[in-house]
Image (cartoon, rainbow, N blue to C red):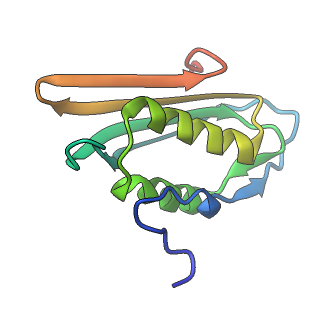
Amino acid sequence: MKNMPEFNKVSKQLLQAMHYQYVGNNINVCIETDEFTCLCPWTGLPDFAHLKIQYIPNKVVVELKSLKMYLQSYRMVGMVHESVVNSIMKDIKQLLKPKQIYVELVFKIRGGITTTVSAGNIKEIKK
């Protein structure tokens, strides 16, 4: 089927960009979801996280349905938390070439531990 993600592999080709109509206007785009999942590479158990992506667009913005499909492609991929945040940031930066970007994942409690991992070329963009 066309546009279906391949299991056990992140499908960055699903990401699409749209022209940003107000080039030159610095706006803060903040995208959040509580539905992000990936797999622990050692146990195969699911890791659930709250994901926040913030960026200031340059010439394009991310098309949200494509972002949703891209994020869902992580569902069957075994990856450590630090790699997940870097992978998402790298793919979005490569697609959008934003002026600034910040990606944060707050992984839900498992074994009594929560993990927050963030990356970006700025500290969290203020709303």
Of 36 and 84, the residue lying toward us: 84
Q: Residue furthest top?
A: 123
**Residue 30 location, x and y as percent?**
55, 36
Residue 38's place in the image compared with 86, above or below, is below
In the figure, is residue 16 to the left or right of 4?
Answer: right
**Residue 62 location, x and y as percent?**
66, 51
**Res. 30 visible in picture:** no
**Residue 106 location, x and y as percent?**
34, 29
Q: Residue furthest left?
A: 111
Residue 44's place in the image compared with 6, above or below, is above
x 44%, y 29%: residue: 82
Circle count: 0
**Res. 125 visible in picture:** yes
**Residue 74 location, x and y as percent?**
42, 53
Task: Name the image quarter holding residue 112.
Answer: top left
Q: Residue furthest bottom?
A: 1
In the figure, is residue 75 to the left or right of 21?
Answer: left
Of 66 and 75, the residue lying toward us: 75
Q: Residue furthest front?
A: 42
In the figure, is residue 6 to the left or right of 120?
Answer: left
x 87%, y 40%: residue: 23
x 47%, y 59%: residue: 9
> Quarter of the image containing the C terminus?
top right
Task: Name the image quarter holding residue 122.
Answer: top right
x 54%, y 24%: residue: 119
